[in-house]
Amino acid sequence: MAAELRAAEEPGRSGPALVMLSHFFEGRRGGIEAVAAALARELSSRDFRVVWLATGKSTGASPVCRRVSLSASRVIEAVLKVPYPLLLPSGWRAIFRAVRAADLVLAHDAIYLTSIAGFLAARLYRRPILLIQHVGFVPYRNVILRVLMRLANRLVAGPILRLADGVVFISEITQRHFATVRWVRPPAVIFNGVDTRIFSAPRSQADVEAARKGLALPLGVPIALFVGRFTEKKGLSVLEQIVRLRPDVFFAFAGQGELDPREWGAPNVAVFATLSGESLAPLYRACDVLVLPSVGEGFPLVVQEAMASGLPVLCGRDTAQADPRAAPYLHGIPVDLDSPNQTARSFSEEISKLLARSADASERQARSEFAKSAYSWGAAASEYVRLLAALTRRVSL
């Protein structure tokens, strides 16, 4: 099988069959799903025969991989407001069948049932499995959810990560949440990539104004941007307070979720619920700053997309410290979801400082060039190919 992996880099050769598992497809418009879609594209371009299994609606036939939609219940999301699909029996069977027919397994976030099923199937059929861990601990305001997540990380995610054939953390921040794990094999840290062919800085103010006109956004006022799921951990309670504190700033929200900013009744809010991937690029170019008061994340993909688009980024302190190389382009503020008003005031003050600074084309271009050099999907995918080859050789011995 190691020979197959080496052959994957050679044109005209059929590479290994790889099953990729995530809790949702990218139509969910979350960061993990966007990363999964990008990895499917990159690994397929290296001749891996990728089959992507996830819950939710698939976008249909894909030019890069085959997709299998898994049956699941969303009762937990409906009751607890957390995105955790419950696999139905047919979903478990589909994962076990796919893993049995595959050479390799790649799963996103050990806490989800898709990854748990994939891990068990990989052990049963002796297939090497690589786990990519995106999230550490989410400090939910609900004490029950906090306790449940601590237990899940300790009793489920930790043991699975420890016993997996390979583990990748998307930042050192995420890895620290699992510092007590006694690793059988040392984990790796690979930052997500960003597609700089799509996300790039505007060349002039005229480009910014053109993007605003195309999206029916106001001219002549500062615009702050949020991109992500409309959920508690993304800081929607903080953002609502910021919106009310700053009537002088217009706020663009790109995403979906149970906490809809349109329900705030604020005149300085616009929601873009259908934009994702390439269609998001003009929205980044139309705005002045990305505001992301989220918690429990490693290094969200939207931060990298914003930098590639030339935006200054205002985020939680942990996120700002995830990659020291990016420190000059990130502005970190402590986030306390139990004190949304105080957190909002701190963010509002920093927004004023960022908007007061010059934001000429050269500054935007400097941020964009940094993202282009630091976060390459091609380089990240090559690291994944190397890890997959190494763990396959180890399992084959």
Image (cartoon, rainbow, N blue to C red):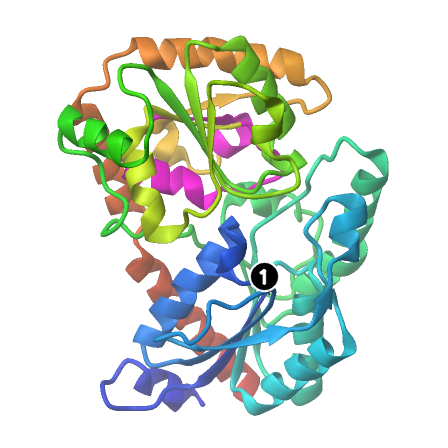
Indicate the quadrant where residue 89 lies.
Answer: bottom right
- Does the rendering let one see residue 278? yes
Name the residue at 45% across, 48% down. 274
Task: Give percent across and percent down for residue 326.
Answer: 36, 34
Task: Give percent across and percent down for residue 244.
Answer: 56, 13
- Tally of numbered discs: 1
Q: Which residue is mark 1?
A: 24
Foreground: 253 or 16? 253
The relative height of residue 14 versus residue 267 in the rendered view (above or below) is: below
Asked whether 245 falls inside the magenta stretch, the response is no
Tell me which segment is drawn in magenta: 293-320
Task: Give percent across and percent down for residue 117.
Answer: 71, 73
Q: Residues within 10 Å of mark 1 (few under 14, many from 20)?
A: many
Indicate the quadrant where residue 252 lies.
Answer: top left
Describe residue 363's horizontal placement relative to residue 389 as left or right. Answer: left
Task: Give percent across and percent down for residue 215.
Answer: 32, 35
The relative height of residue 287 versus residue 10 in the rendered view (above or below) is: above
Callout 1, which amino acid?
Phe
Describe residue 167's horizontal placement relative to residue 302 as left or right. Answer: right
Name the residue at 37% across, 52% down. 277
Image quadrant holding the N terminus, namely: bottom left
Image quadrant holding the C terminus, namely: bottom right
The relative height of residue 385 versus residue 357 in the rendered view (above or below) is: below
The relative height of residue 311 versus residue 136 in the rendered view (above or below) is: above
- Does the rendering let one see residue 397? no
Foreground: 94 or 75? 75
Describe residue 132's horizontal placement relative to residue 39 as left or right. Answer: right
Foreground: 65 or 172? 65
- Callout 1 secondary element: strand
